[in-house]
Amino acid sequence: MPAESRTWAGTTLTDRRAARRRQLLDAGLDLLGSDGGAAVSVRAVCRGSKLTERYFYENFADRDELVLAVYDGVVEQAHRALLNAVGAVGSSAGTPRDRAEAAVTAFVELIIDDPRKGRVLLLAPLTDPTLNRRGIARIPMFAELVREQLSGEADDAERAMTATALVGGLANLFSAYLAGGLTVSRDRLVAHCVRLVLGAEALHG
């Protein structure tokens, strides 16, 4: 029987490795999503996860690899939340307002209900050199989601420019909110973002 399949205390080696990796990622999320990149070190992650450096290096080559894994995990959650929200409304049955409200609400729930994820997604790439280029590289993925929702007769280049501008504007708005620069209610934030999305939609109506 392969070592990975042998059980100990009811769990396999594969399961225990996956659990340790999850502990390390959770500790990295706590650190990167609260105090910023400077607080994320191998020692701090091991302390937060209550695991030794042996287990850290079993999963990650170095501190930067962990930081990228934490960031990519949050990006994946955000992307999936937006896809699910828009998909649940349905492009044929739902109105542009329905889709905008569903997408904005889902995104706000992700980054505000768990502010750690919002800070990792929007603020950490501004301060952590490891994430700077990765953050820039992820913008087109979110812009494409917006572009697909824009209707009208505009050509692809026009729609791409509108989508990119909208993603950048919303990212700055959410960043200011998370950083404490905006003191408005959650409902008002959502309503304003929906108006921005619908304004972009109107450009191509």
Image (spheres, rainbow, N blue to C red):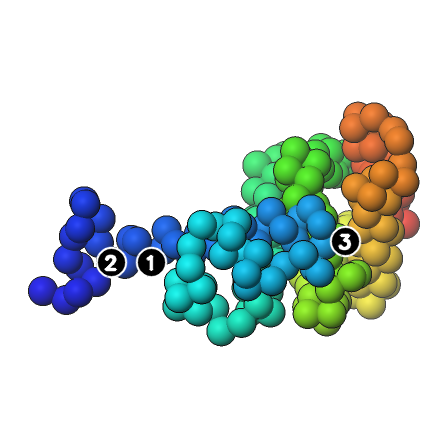
Label 1 environment density (alpha carbons within 10 Å; few <14, some 14–19, many ≥20): some
Q: Residue at x 47, y 68 (%)?
A: 60
**Vertically, is 67 above or below 78?**
below
> Can residue 179 be seen at all in this image of the molecule?
yes
State the residue in front, 79 or 21. Answer: 21
The x and y percentages for residue 147 are 74, 56
How far from the left and from the top, in percent, is residue 165? 86, 57
* Amino acid on which the number 1 mark rests in the picture: Arg
> In the rendered image, which residue does mark 3 sit on?
123
Against 62, residue 173 (above or below) is above
- Checking the image for residue 38, the label placed there is none
Q: Is residue 156 left or right of residue 107?
A: right
Residue under label 1: 17
- Residue that badge 2 annotates: 13
- Depth-wise, is mark 2 or mark 3 nearer the camera? 2
Work out whether mark 3 precedes mark 1 in sequence or the reverse, and give the earlier one: 1
Rounded to the nearest angstrom, the CA distance separating label 2 from label 3 is: 36 Å
Secondary element at tag 3? helix
